Image: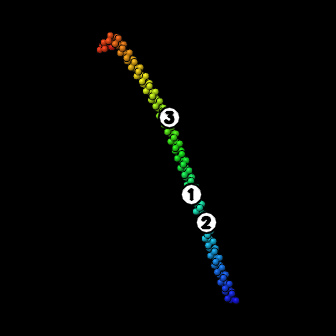
Amino acid sequence: ETERARAKAEEDKRRREHERATARLEEQRRAHEVEREAARVQREAEQKRAQEEALERHRSHEEMLRKNKEFNQQMQERREKSQQKRAALQEQHAKNWERATSMLQQVHEQIEIVTDGWREAPFW
């Protein structure tokens, strides 16, 4: 009977050790799962932040392109206005030049008439 009691005590001891080992393993498994879940949450947060940053960079780039396009349009309009103004000024200058040339031609003709073709005579 003592042999049986000893065997039972030994088996109870092994069972308790097995239960403790199983409990330790279960605790380690839970801790590992908690770590994995924390890593997953952190990874998802980093991915979300990276996506938001990429979206912000995209928006910023699109805004820069829009501003550049507006600027180029304004510069094109300014160039066109400047070219039109320059053409108008050149045309006005040509008209003024023609008028001045015509007036000088008339003056010379009148001087020739008054001086009877004598070009070296003073016109006064």
Residue 67, how many percent across, how many down?
52, 42
Residue underneath mark 2: 34
Q: Amino acid at mark 1?
A: Glu
Kindly check if marks 3 and 1 are in contact, taking CB atoms under 8 A apart as contact. Answer: no
Q: Amino acid at mark 3?
A: Glu
Residue underneath mark 1: 46
In terms of image quadrants, where is residue 119?
top left
Q: Amino acid at mark 2?
A: Val
Q: Quadrant of the C terminus?
A: top left
The numbered mark, 3 or 2, whose residue comes first in the sequence reads: 2
- The secondary structure type at the circle numbered 2 is helix
Give the CA separation, mark 3 to mark 1.
46 Å
Residue underneath mark 3: 77
| Residue 124 can be seen, yes or no | no
Closer to the observer: label 3 or label 1?
Answer: 3
Which class describes the residues within 10 Å of circle 2: few (<14), some (14-19), or many (20+)? few
Q: Residue at coordinates 35% horizontally, 11% vertically from top-left?
A: 113
Which class describes the residues within 10 Å of circle 3: few (<14), some (14-19), or many (20+)? few
- The secondary structure type at the circle numbered 1 is helix
